[in-house]
Amino acid sequence: AAEGIKAEVRYIASTREDTFATPEDAFEKLAAMIDDSSAVQASAAERERARANLREWLAVNLVPNEHAGEPDCKGVAQGAWHLAEPRTVTWAFLAWNTDGTA
């Protein structure tokens, strides 16, 4: 490694206030995250258990959206359902100078 390179690392929390047209729409969109994130490391049986757990979790955490039809932060009409608590996604930001300055 080159001397004098000082990396900057920051974590950025991003809130997601997803809305869904129907409970099944919510299940399909969130289940896609299970499949996308675990396809390499989780077995088909583990993914299927996670999908079953998701159905149970949504039964408790998916609620009617009192702002359905109103524009969201991107101007898109909100769906009829949303999660009781917004999702938080944490991103890692990495940066460094290659010219040796700190």
Image: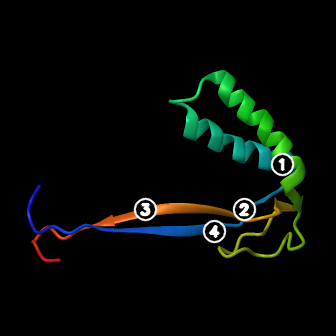
The local secondary structure at tag 1 comes to helix
- Whether pointer 4 and pointer 3 mark residues with C-beta atoms closer than 8 Å, the reply is no
- Against 1, residue 37 (above or below) is above
- Spatial separation of the CA atoms under disc 4 and disc 1: 18 Å
**Badge 2 is on which residue?**
18
Q: Position of residue 92 (x, y in %)?
A: 43, 62
Which comes before the other along the chain, label 3 or label 1? Answer: 1
The residue at the point 53 percent across, 62 percent down is 90
In front of the other: 18 or 56:
56
- Spatial separation of the CA atoms under disc 2 and disc 1: 13 Å
**Badge 3 is on which residue?**
92
- Whether pointer 2 and pointer 1 mark residues with C-beta atoms closer than 8 Å, the reply is no
Q: Quadrant location of the N terminus?
A: bottom left
Count residues near mark 4 (Cα–Cα under 10 Å), then give few for <14, some for 14-19, many for 20+: few
Tell me where residue 66 sits by quadrant: bottom right
- Spatial separation of the CA atoms under disc 3 and disc 2: 21 Å
- Whether pointer 3 and pointer 2 mark residues with C-beta atoms closer than 8 Å, the reply is no
**Badge 4 is on which residue?**
15
- Spatial separation of the CA atoms under disc 4 and disc 3: 14 Å
Amino acid on which the number 2 mark rests in the picture: Asp
- Spatial separation of the CA atoms under disc 3 and disc 1: 28 Å
- Whether pointer 4 and pointer 1 mark residues with C-beta atoms closer than 8 Å, the reply is no
Q: Which mark is residue 58?
A: 1
Query: What colouring style does the render use?
Result: rainbow
Which comes before the other along the chain, label 3 or label 2? Answer: 2
In front of the other: 74 or 90:
90
Q: Which mark is residue 40?
A: none
- Against 101, residue 45 (above or below) is above
